[in-house]
């Protein structure tokens, strides 16, 4: 229907241009330039520019002026969310004209704070486990074993996103998967790691069981599940047809936030750890907590597509692995 509407608009535009040409006075044919190429006539340039503008416009709907060119099947009665999309299952979703400012902003913030937390811990774990930050209270691990812990944690973080993806696609959707993984795994894992820095808090001796659960299970599983959903959830805030060209700029901002979070986390936490590793390790916990609060505060603004499958499909996918 959209293609048919576009074709009708293009035909009307061509007819208007032809009528304008007929009313315009005759002008002599343009002379060839020094390189042998004939310059384009002003009218032809106008047509080409209009066609180019039309093509860009149809995938960059971002202002009220653009709505007049759309068929009613793509419009809602909601002035705040005027763009409509109906998926294969018949579910209707309403979209903002400017999702970057309305909803995506919250997603970019939580990603930046999450990367701050991840790299702040990741860059300092080896030094923490070997006792570099506190000679009197540490895991007393050799550097090889400490590096192995970090490698295993990173491997788990980068191999578990498929679990988050399957949960999002089949049961919970991206929004609830991110919230569940953060509250049930990510924040508890970071908190457990931070608590091991407090002398005698989890026992009279350094609690290796707590560090294993926090560093090798909860924290990496949580970040893996979030990693699978956050970038996709942000992209789904844009209309899949009428705003498809805007998604490219979203990913530019998304990876910029990743780099900012990684850079600041990789600087702030190690510097603080030289003074107090306990304070340094509770900073990522607080930053991620703030990120979750900001993310939840934008709940009413998000487009939340429903899962495509059900729990039985999810079980079959897990069994297949």
Image: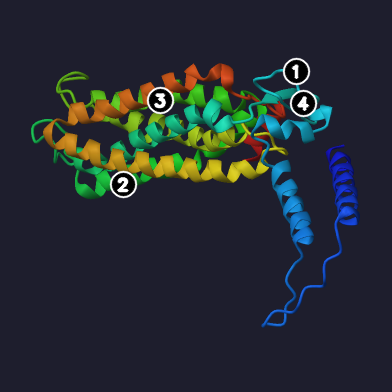
- Residue 221 in percent (x, y) is at 45, 33
Q: CA distance from mark 4 to mark 2?
A: 55 Å
Residue 42 visible to an observer of this rendering: yes
On-image quarter of the C terminus? top right
Tell me the residue that label 1 is attached to.
77
- Work out whether 48 lies above or below 255: below
Tell me the residue that label 3 is attached to.
291
Tell me the residue that label 4 is attached to.
75
Classify residue 190 by image quadrant. Answer: top left
- Which residue of the protein is positioned furthest toward the front in this rendering? 25
- Work out whether 255 lies above or below 181: below
Q: Nearer the viewer, residue 102 or 153?
A: 102
Which mark's residue is nearer the viewer, 2 or 1? 1
Residue 306 visible to an observer of this rendering: no
Q: Are dots 3 and 4 in contact, CB under 8 Å?
A: no
Tell which circle, 3 or 1, labels the residue nearer the N-terminal end. 1
For residue 127, side relative to residue 76 (left or right): left
Q: Are dots 4 and 2 in contact, CB under 8 Å?
A: no
Q: Are dots 1 and 4 in contact, CB under 8 Å?
A: yes
Tell which circle, 2 or 1, labels the residue nearer the N-terminal end. 1
For residue 8, side relative to residue 301 (left or right): right
- Which residue of the protein is positioned furthest toward the left in this rendering? 136
Q: CA distance from mark 3 to mark 2?
A: 30 Å
Q: CA distance from mark 1 to mark 4?
A: 7 Å
Q: Which residue shows up at 18% across the image and 39% down it?
A: 271
Tell which circle, 4 or 2, labels the residue nearer the N-terminal end. 4
Q: Secondary structure at mark 1?
A: loop
Q: Secondary structure at mark 3?
A: helix
Which mark's residue is nearer the viewer, 3 or 1? 1
Q: Nearer the viewer, residue 95 or 52?
A: 52
Tell me the residue that label 2 is attached to.
148
């Amino acid at each position: 229907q959209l293609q048919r509407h576009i074709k009708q608009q293009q035909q009307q535009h061509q007819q208007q241009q032809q009528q304008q040409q007929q009313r315009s006075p005759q002008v002599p044919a343009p002379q060839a330039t020094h390189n042998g190429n004939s310059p384009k006539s002003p009218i032809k340039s106008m047509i080409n520019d209009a066609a180019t503008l039309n093509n860009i416009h149809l995938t960059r709907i971002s202002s009220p002026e653009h709505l007049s060119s759309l068929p009613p099947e793509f419009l809602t009665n909601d002035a705040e969310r005027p763009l409509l999309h109906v998926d294969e299952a018949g579910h209707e979703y309403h979209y903002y004209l400017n999702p970057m400012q309305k909803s995506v902003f919250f997603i970019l913030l939580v990603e930046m704070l999450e990367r701050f937390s991840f790299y702040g811990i990741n860059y300092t774990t080896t030094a923490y486990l070997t006792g570099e930050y506190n000679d009197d209270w540490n895991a007393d691990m050799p550097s090889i074993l400490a590096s192995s812990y970090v490698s295993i944690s990173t491997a788990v973080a980068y191999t578990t996103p498929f679990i988050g993806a399957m949960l999002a696609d089949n049961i919970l959707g991206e929004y609830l998967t991110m919230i569940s993984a953060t509250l049930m795994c990510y924040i508890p894992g970071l908190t457990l790691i931070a608590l091991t820095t407090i002398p005698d808090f989890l026992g009279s001796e350094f609690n290796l069981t707590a560090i294993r659960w926090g560093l090798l299970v909860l924290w990496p599983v949580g970040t893996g599940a979030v990693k699978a959903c956050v970038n996709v959830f942000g992209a789904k805030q844009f209309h899949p047809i009428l705003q498809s060209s805007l998604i490219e700029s979203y990913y530019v901002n998304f990876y910029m936030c990743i780099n900012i979070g990684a850079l600041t986390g990789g600087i702030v936490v190690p510097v603080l750890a030289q003074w107090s590793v306990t304070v340094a390790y509770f900073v990522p916990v607080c930053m991620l907590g703030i990120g979750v609060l900001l993310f939840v505060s934008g709940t009413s603004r998000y487009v939340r597509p429903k899962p495509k499958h059900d729990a039985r499909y999810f079980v079959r996918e897990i069994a297949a692995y």
